[in-house]
Amino acid sequence: MPNRPRILVENACYHLIARGNQKQRVFLNEEDFKEYLERLRQYKRKFNFKLYAYCLMPNHIHIVGQIEVAKNLSKFMQGITLSYSLYFNDKYSGAGHLWQGRFKNKIIVKDQYLVDCINYIELNPVRAKIASARHEYRWSSYGERVLDNGFNVLDEFML
């Protein structure tokens, strides 16, 4: 059964989700998380993607942001996931798909729902019992957004 076409809207925010193939871990150590963030930084510049929040979980990722040209959303995610997959497979002598199918995207209106979505994804490590509080988890945007001690990849947003 073919995939349905993505619904893309100009000037909209998106909640993007990609999962590890068969729920496998896609980040095995600190270097992997840092490598993904560097690739995220590179591709957000290339496609003029405004990054408002993220959470890198051991077996999946969440990204919240806005892309200048909506039709480039798939190219943005394809660039990150493909380049990170090549890195991961090379580092761990793997082969094949790292990510499960195509990424999911949800349109977000820039209102209270955007704030709620950011809070939701930054609480993922707490719900998964990886951390007891948001500020303890290093691989989400919370540290940079609230505590000013992150990886300097976020862009500011206005509601």
Image (spheres, grey):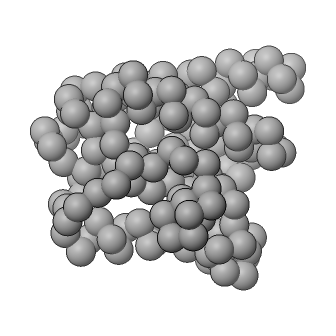
- Please tell me which residue lies in front, 104 or 88: 88
Query: What's the residue at 20%, 29% (across, down)?
Result: 69
Residue 106 seen: no
Figure check: 132 above or below 63: below
Q: Outermost residue toward the bottom?
A: 132
Q: Outermost residue toward the front?
A: 148
Residue 28: % across, % down: 82, 44
Figure check: 121 above or below 112: above
Residue 19 seen: yes
Q: Where is residue 53, by image quadrant?
A: bottom left
| Lateral position of residue 128 relative to residue 145, left or right | right
Q: How many marks?
A: 0
| Lateral position of residue 85 relative to residue 102, left or right | right
Q: Where is residue 150, by image quadrant?
A: bottom right
| Lateral position of residue 109 relative to residue 45, left or right | left
Query: What's the residue at 75%, 27% (across, down)?
Result: 88
Residue 77: % across, % down: 44, 31
Residue 44: % across, % down: 42, 32
| Lateral position of residue 140 relative to residue 131, left or right | left
Q: Outermost residue toward the left?
A: 10
Query: What's the residue at 29%, 57% (across, down)?
Result: 157
Residue 130: % across, % down: 74, 70
Figure check: 78 above or below 124: above
Query: What's the residue at 72%, 22% (across, down)?
Result: 87
Q: Where is residue 84, by image quadrant?
A: top right
Locate the N terminus by quadrant. top left
- Please tell me which residue lies in front, 50 or 130: 50
Figure check: 15 above or below 42: below
Locate the C terminus by quadrant. bottom left
